[in-house]
Image (cartoon, helix red, strand yellow):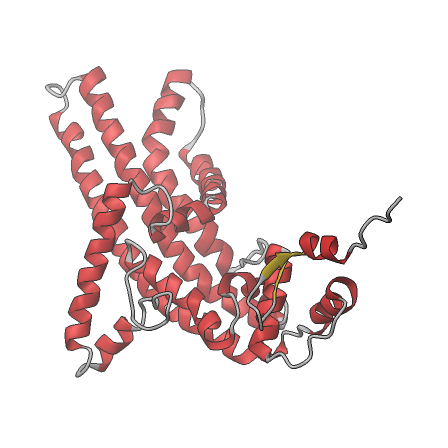
Amino acid sequence: MKLPFVFGIRLVFRIFLPGFFFSLFLFPLAFLIKKTLSQPVSAEIYFILAPALLGWLISLLDIPIYKLYEGREFWPPSIKRCGIKLQKRRLIALRKTAKTDVEKQIKLARFPLSEEFRTREAQAPTKLGNILAEAEQYPDIKYGMDGVFFWYRIWYLLDNDTRVWCDEIRSVADSALYISFVFIIGSIILLLYFLYELLFNGIIYSPIECYIYIILSIISLVLAYGLYRIATTLHEENSDYFKALFDVYWKKFDTGPIIAILENNILQKSLRGLSDSEKLFVAWQYLRWDQYSDVNTSKTKTVAEIFLEQKPPPAEK
């Protein structure tokens, strides 16, 4: 969860830095539009307004950007399968040396566990996707808490200083990933500039200007990959903070009021004797899915089904 926009270092990392680099890629287009329309827009005004507006646009794409880099969406099936195969190879290589190398053991632990929680596996086609999947899985394994669902509840238990500090360290990783995305888009924009020069100005008349776009496009892709690697390293550290917050605050999440609602308003029976993890599971199912699972019979029913069972049969005429 990210805090609302406030003026400070987080705004610089999430808005102005990505927006500044994006504005650099779009400046030739802005110059061409200015030349075509004969509008006296100065470069100073452009680099004051464009970074803020473009950075704001990039921040709106936060979730799609993360889904792309994690490999959750926007990946063609064949490419996604290739990515998972590469991650599996990395996993196998780490297993061979992890027994004698502590650093390799730490890297191996960045992969999520299988559904049976027995072995590490590559679930995502990217390194970042596996790092975040493992972090989100941690609270479920340790405390029976769905990591994504309960994170928003844990967030409100934090004091303001802790929330600000968490958001500041997260903003650095966000910035690296945003700028990496900007460089990928920028490489495509540079290729479009090359095609424009080729089609409208002619490559014979300006060969250096044409080919410089290709060179800059390649450099942009290299920088995008480098920033992605930096972002994954930062997210490794952030995932440790994420897990530490659950270690410290999971006990402070009070399931009592939710259990009381189930007992008094829905189930009409006592739920005493449940362990802490069972209470968290029952609360998660009720709040997230509007369901209840009996821990003894493992039968799952929706709240509507429970109400229908409790409804007395119609009186015979």
Residue at the front extreme, as displayed: 317
Q: Choose top left, top right, bottom left or bottom right for residue 283.
A: bottom right
Question: In this view of the protein, which residue sits in the foreground, 97 or 65?
Answer: 97
Q: Residue 218, percent across and down?
A: 18, 42
Q: Residue 250, percent across and down?
A: 57, 76
Question: In this view of the protein, which residue sits in the foreground, 42 or 197?
Answer: 197
Vertical position of residue 49 compared to residue 127: above or below: above
Question: In the visual, does 260 lie left or right of 138?
Answer: right
> Quarter holding the C terminus?
top right
Q: Residue 19, percent across and down?
A: 42, 44
Identity of the residue drawn at 43% across and 40% down: 47
Identity of the residue drawn at 34% across and 66% down: 114
Vertical position of residue 264 compared to residue 59: above or below: below
Q: Residue 201, percent across and down?
A: 20, 17
Total numbered circles: 0
> Quarter holding the N terminus?
bottom right
Question: In this view of the protein, which residue sits in the foreground, 206 or 43?
Answer: 206
Identity of the residue drawn at 19% across and 81% down: 101
Q: Is residue 223 visible?
A: no
Vertical position of residue 282 compared to residue 247: above or below: above
Q: Choose top left, top right, bottom left or bottom right for residue 211.
A: top left
Q: Is residue 183 visible?
A: yes
Identity of the residue drawn at 29% across and 59% down: 127
